[in-house]
Image (cartoon, rainbow, N blue to C red):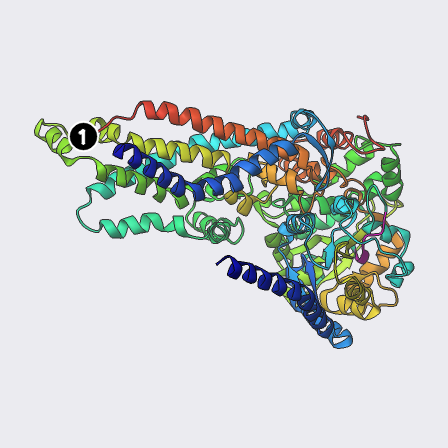
């Protein structure tokens, strides 16, 4: 009886504590998502909903010119995910390991590594725009002055270099985030495992690969899922540096930019199309939702308990 | 306890009833004392100008105006969201033609008559069309200014390069560019980092190749298509300018490109009259002259691409209709138009405005004589995919060799044929 009362009491508290978060999720995620889903099934005139359209908006999304833009954007999102996952996560892991093994100055370097993450994105974007300006920018000037004229190029303006440049800037800004997550993961590893491995004669490399890395699996799961969601909803940096059209010539276009463009229209090219924009929103939601669900399931299976 | 509760409820009900009568009376009184209306714009760069003008308006009428400019690129989304939510400003700047016709068609703007704004009666039909709905054709704003495309040049740099006579044909223009280049001077400031700027470049040099207004009318009527050979030739003209653009042209953004001309590095810049204010803000002593776009050959017609550049409208749901209309009438006045011409180098639509700036005056003179509609803005931005949404990234591909003029023309045609009444189903 006493135990039942405690359970009831616990349930009451759990419900009370969860209510604000649930309400927030319901208001800001579930209802907008369901609303967007409903928007995709109507014709629109500007922001005025007209008659029922069935699957017409979805069909149009897979017809010219939206189909070309969709495939182009999706390809960029996939490439960005792969590049960020390999480069940013890999570098973050190395930085975390370096910070972990540091005996002096760890706090200073930890702050330095994390600093770009807290910078305003607009400031970061503007700073890199100035640095990379093909005419006045210091990067090309340094390259030109030191005999590397061939390497001086319009980094953000060329269709071949624009996306890799954005990935690099993203890496510069965000590498501190996985580094800090991995560092907390490394700090959470029971030092007895590492000591035991050392006593067994394992090298530092072997300890990292065979002891630390497997025990970092929970951190890896978090980073993988967040990187996946971030890559497929990539909007802020491309918008700041390439505008809503994914300048130049759609070379930095992403699904989120296309969604924005379709939903709100653009200053210089005019009309919006809320219906097709909503259909794209549903598609993005499905990609991110399903990807995150299956990804986290797969990743969790390889996690080991300490 | 219960009696106390009933008394309390009665007291509360009385308080609510009294406040329902008294509060609106108080607020009405304060509104009469000092009417304040809101005015939104995308001209962040003209904030000081508008605030000074609003102070003049307040001195005249006693109506206080809160002027809020939003970032140009964010303005459409902010205004659309606010209006759709039943809010938004009392008076606002409205994009021309298809730019906000969807908002107009949805009933967000007050339909204006010549009774509301008498100055509307003095505008020509072509200019009025810049602020009319797409489906309903109501007059949703007072078009305040017109823009005109042309070629800016630096006479001192041309003299230095030995270019004596101004070019009048396409061949002469390319020859002048070559001569300037040979003298070690950058011929053209225009670059490819910004799709809309390339579209404007085409709107300047293109009409002489496709045949200006006649082609525009034929295209709108569906008698011709974007795949017409003349239109393809106009796209090729943009590509022909690439050798004269600055090094790294594909990555040079809009401001840097304009800055190259303003800072006297480039001898020519092809664009709209609105660039003049920017040039002068960077270099007040810039030697700058203007000429209309050249003709494709001797004897061919010259054209100056032009369009109504925006309008002032009233929120259909405003609670301050009289004050809002007073402001629109002020914005349509000769006094305000004169200030626009003198202070921000615009070409106002208000009649009797004297354009004192010699460069702006010349632009206006040629606009009147050779004006032709900016094809994409005036005719093909009413539904998505707009012609601009294909052409802007398309021009960036064209100048880097990633597409051909014929392919780009085909892409625009395919896109526009999905919705444009005259072009529907045509290839």
Q: Is residue B396 left or right of residue A304?
A: right
Residue in the picture at 15% in, 29% down: A203
- Neighbourhood count class around disc 1 (C-alpha, 10 Å): few under 14, some 14–19, many 20 upward: some
* Residue A42: x %, y % from top left: 70, 32
On the question of residue B154 being in view, the answer is no
Queried whether the magenta region covers residue B139, the answer comes back as yes
* Residue A130: x %, y % from top left: 50, 53
Position above or below: B62 against A137: below
In the rendered image, the residue lying farthest to the left is A199
Q: What is the span of residues highlighted in magenta in the rendered image?
A: B138-146
Position above or below: A2 against B294: above
Q: Nearer the viewer, residue B31 or B290?
A: B31
Quarter placement of the C terminus of chain B: top right
* Residue B294: x %, y % from top left: 80, 49
Q: Which residue is tagged 1?
A: A207
Q: Is residue B298 left or right of residue A83?
A: right
Q: Nearer the viewer, residue B222 or A152?
A: B222
Helix, strand or loop at mark 1: helix
Asked which quadrant contains residue B348, the reply is bottom right
């Amino acid at each position: 009886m006493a135990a039942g009362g405690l359970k009831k009491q616990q349930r009451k508290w759990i419900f009370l504590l969860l209510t604000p978060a649930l309400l927030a999720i319901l208001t800001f995620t579930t209802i907008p998502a369901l609303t967007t889903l409903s928007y995709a099934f109507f014709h629109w005139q500007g922001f005025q909903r007209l008659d029922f359209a069935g699957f017409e908006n979805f069909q149009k999304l897979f017809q010219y010119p939206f189909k070309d833009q969709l495939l182009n954007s999706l390809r960029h999102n996939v490439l960005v995910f792969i590049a960020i996952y390999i480069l940013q996560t890999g570098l973050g892991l190395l930085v975390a390991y370096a910070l972990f093994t540091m005996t002096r100055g760890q706090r200073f370097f930890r702050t330095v590594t994390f600093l770009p993450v807290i910078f305003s994105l607009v400031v970061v974007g503007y700073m890199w725009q100035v640095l990379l300006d093909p005419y006045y920018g210091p990067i090309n000037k340094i390259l030109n002055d030191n005999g590397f004229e061939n390497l001086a190029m319009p980094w953000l303006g060329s269709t071949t270099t624009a996306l890799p440049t954005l990935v690099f800037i993203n890496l510069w800004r965000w590498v501190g985030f996985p580094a800090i997550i991995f560092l907390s993961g490394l700090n959470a590893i029971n030092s007895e495992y590492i000591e035991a491995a050392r006593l067994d004669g394992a090298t530092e490399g072997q300890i990292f690969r065979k002891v630390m890395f497997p025990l970092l699996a929970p951190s890896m799961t978090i980073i993988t899922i967040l990187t996946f969601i971030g890559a497929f909803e990539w909007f802020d940096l491309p918008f700041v540096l390439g505008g809503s059209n994914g300048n130049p010539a759609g070379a930095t276009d992403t699904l989120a930019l296309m969604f924005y463009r379709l939903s709100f229209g653009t200053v210089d090219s005019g009309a919006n199309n809320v219906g097709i924009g909503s259909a794209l929103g549903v598609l993005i939601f499905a990609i991110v939702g399903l990807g995150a669900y299956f990804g986290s399931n797969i990743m969790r299976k390889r996690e080991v308990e300490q | 306890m219960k009696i106390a509760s009933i008394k309390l409820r009665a007291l509360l009900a009385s308080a609510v009833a009294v406040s329902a009568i008294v509060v609106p009376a108080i607020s009405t009184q304060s509104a009469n004392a000092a009417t304040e209306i809101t005015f939104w714009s995308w001209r962040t760069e003209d904030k000081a100008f508008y605030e000074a003008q609003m102070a003049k308006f307040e001195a005249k009428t006693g109506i206080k105006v809160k002027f809020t400019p939003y970032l140009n690129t964010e303005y459409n989304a902010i205004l659309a969201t606010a209006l759709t939510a039943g809010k938004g400003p009392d008076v606002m700047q409205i994009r021309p033609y298809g730019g906000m016709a969807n908002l107009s068609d949805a009933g967000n703007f007050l339909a204006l008559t010549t009774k509301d704004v008498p100055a509307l009666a003095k505008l020509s039909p072509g200019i009025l069309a810049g602020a009319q709905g797409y489906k309903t054709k109501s007059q949703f704003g007072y078009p305040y200014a017109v823009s005109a495309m042309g070629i800016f040049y630096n006479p001192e740099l041309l003299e230095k390069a030995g270019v004596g006579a101004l070019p009048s044909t396409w061949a002469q223009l390319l020859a002048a560019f070559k001569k300037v280049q040979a003298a070690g001077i950058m011929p053209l400031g225009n670059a490819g980092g910004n799709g809309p700027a390339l579209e404007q470049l085409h709107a300047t040099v293109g009409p002489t190749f496709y045949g200006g207004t006649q082609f525009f009318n034929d295209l709108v009527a569906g008698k011709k298509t974007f795949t017409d050979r003349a239109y393809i030739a106009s796209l090729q003209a943009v590509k022909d300018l690439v050798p004269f653009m600055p090094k790294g042209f594909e990555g040079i953004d809009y401001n840097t490109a304009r800055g190259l001309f303003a800072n006297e590095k480039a001898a020519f810049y092809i664009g709209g009259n609105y660039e003049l204010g920017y040039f002068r803000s960077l270099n007040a002593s810039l030697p700058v002259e203007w000429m209309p776009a050249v003709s494709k050959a001797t004897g061919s017609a010259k054209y100056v691409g032009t369009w109504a550049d925006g309008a002032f409208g009233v929120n259909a749901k405003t609670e301050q209709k009289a004050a809002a209309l007073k402001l629109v009438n002020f914005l349509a006045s000769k006094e305000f138009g004169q200030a626009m011409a003198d202070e921000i180098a615009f070409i106002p639509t208000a009649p009797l405005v004297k354009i004192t700036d010699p460069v702006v005056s010349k632009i206006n003179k040629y606009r009147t004589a050779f004006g032709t509609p900016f094809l994409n803005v005036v005719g093909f931005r009413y539904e998505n995919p707009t012609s601009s949404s294909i052409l802007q990234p398309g021009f960036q591909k064209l100048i880097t060799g990633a597409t051909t003029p014929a392919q780009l023309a085909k892409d625009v045609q395919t896109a526009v044929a999905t919705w444009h009444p005259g072009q529907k189903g045509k290839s």
